[in-house]
Amino acid sequence: MATRYDWQPSSGDIPTTPGVYRFLDQRNRVIYVGKAKNLRSRLQSYFAEPVTLHERTRRMVQSAASLDWTLVPTERQALQLEYLWIKQFQPEFNVRFRDDKSYPYLVVTVADDIPRVFLARKKGIKGAKYFGPFPTTGALRDTLSTILKAFPVRSCSQTTYAKAQRDNRPCLLGDIGKCAAPCVARVSQPEHKALALSLASFMAGNDRGVVEDLTVAMNNAAANLEFERAAKARDRIEAIETILMKNTMVLDERVDADVFGVAADGLVAAAHVFRVRGGRIRGAKGFIVETPATESGETLVEMILRDGFDEQPPARVVVVPDLPANAKWWERQLTEARLAAGEEGHVRLKTAQRGELAELGASVGLNARHTLQSHLSHRTSDPVARSHALAELRDALGLEEAPLRIECFDVSHLGGENQVASMVVFEDGLPRREHYRKFAVEGARDDTEAIHQVISRRVARLQTSEDPTAEATTGFRYPPGLLIVDGGLPQVNAAARALQAAGVSIPVCGVAKKLEEIWVPGADFPLILPRSSEGLFLVQRVRDEAHRVAITYQRGTRKRTLTTELTDIPGVGSSTARELLKRFKSVSQLKKASLEDLMSVEGVGPKLADTIHAFFGDS
């Protein structure tokens, strides 16, 4: 059986997305850095039976005391971040990337009459431009293969080039469009050199300028009816957009920034920050901020600015999702903190809408969302936290015992029409989805009548069976320890009236969304639980789950209602009705459709189109 370490994360907490992971020892030193396309799959391999691991891997895992990871959008970015952190931390168990001599460079011999592009591990060619180093040869070869689609510069050796000249026949790269074939004069020497200079300019970071030049060339060629030339320019633009998008893990060396991302859910928000120094991500950190649900994005930003610089001074640029109203004051405060730490330079607070920092901000946001999900998952799965939550609810509501079974009801409708309701069940703080119920509500004038109707129908099932084992597998006849309704005092009072009319004594309360207030029947004032309360967190989760089930059911019945309305049309069956709704989205849009629009739908011919048009024309 595989060994489980105290610091080992549960499988469900590890994301399945690309990222970079770090093993740390007891002194918080990084001892190994790795990257993965699927973090969960990769990290689980380290926790197999120790005897099955490579000796070096086994020593590394046994030396570790903690593990963290950083998410990135693509595997290519994970590769680049892995390289940067291995160079930065020099981990004991990483055997690659020890010095730059082993790294490949992309070389363009722009000083030659017939320039060449190729891979090399050493510098020294006079007049050549070097780009890199790159993390692995394989990744660079893949990149070069795509580069040649956009910039078909000669990449062959001098021997191969001379042979092609003698035979007046290009090599395979020339035949497949990855070389402009100057060897057989398909392009002139100046044209080929211009291609090489464009490639060098592109690799140096002037990608927008190259794309703009190619776009102008494509439009001019099309205007002159030179469609083959225009098509080649178009293909080069597409290849550039596909591959050589800037790697957001490596920025300009002048960039010195702290990039923050925020994700919020109810009373809890998560923040994540990338520390960028000298154009490289030198650190990443996530942390939880507990805040009332009514807080705005600007207030959350102020909270992370307050808590996000405990370990090191702020950078010269601090990127946040939203600028607070008192941004200038915060800039002064952060500048003072920077000066107090012995760092020079004024701090500028900004948002990033485009460019490298905006792309990096997307990665930071991804990590913030994962930090939040991990926190909520841990809080939900922790039996101690769940027990504490139930005890808090017992004490706050004055119950005789902790409500081990909680049922929550929510009503959903569309503009007062097509009312439905949901019932969700939590036992011991965890959802029991097999006990969920959905209700179609008939004749209710508002939410209070709907709640009264649904609660009445629910408690009636507690009384009608003489067989105590009936529906035991569904739990529908099992009395709950607490009923929760989504709403304030009117909804709670309606639920209490339904219970009283049925002669059933079950504790009931409601939760109002705006301020997360807990209401009990007949109360003058609501209960206000602390924002860090485990009890309030549980009530929120139950309420949100009831809302999710109700709105999903309402949307489903809405589609069925629309389909039923359409099947009243002679000649329209359920499959045709679905196609009509897929095409027009709603009956109101369908009523505006012309005969030509109707006949564009699969299964609708001229005769049926006339029938549909006439049906709605008469309605």
Image: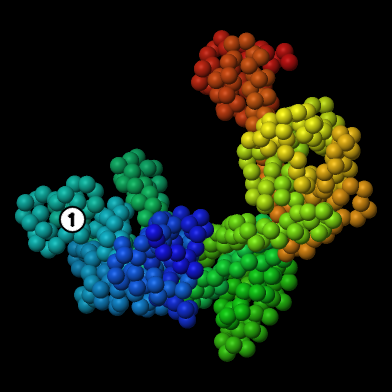
Q: Name the residue carrying label 1.
A: 182
Give left or right: position of 512 versus 428.
right
Give left or right: position of 536 versus 284.
right
Tell me what residue is drawn at x 46 percent, y 54 percent. Answer: 16
Is 530 located above or below residue 617 in the figure?
below
Tell me what residue is drawn at x 54 percent, y 12 percent. Answer: 606
Between residues 111 and 302, which one lies in front from this camera angle?
Answer: 302
Between residues 198 and 243, which one lies in front from this camera angle?
Answer: 243
Q: Residues within 10 Å of mark 1 (few under 14, many from 20)?
A: many
- The answer to whether one can see residue 554 in this image is no
Is 140 located above or below residue 345 in the figure?
above
Residue 500 location, x and y as percent? 89, 38
- For badge 1, the amino acid type reads Pro
Tell me what residue is drawn at x 67 percent, y 52 percent. Answer: 429
| Quadrant of residue 140 within the rendered picture | bottom left
Tell me what residue is drawn at x 59 percent, y 14 percent. Answer: 572
Determine whether the residue tagged by mark 1 lies in a helix, strand or loop: helix
The quadrant in which the C terminus is found is top right
- The answer to whether one can see residue 299 in this image is yes
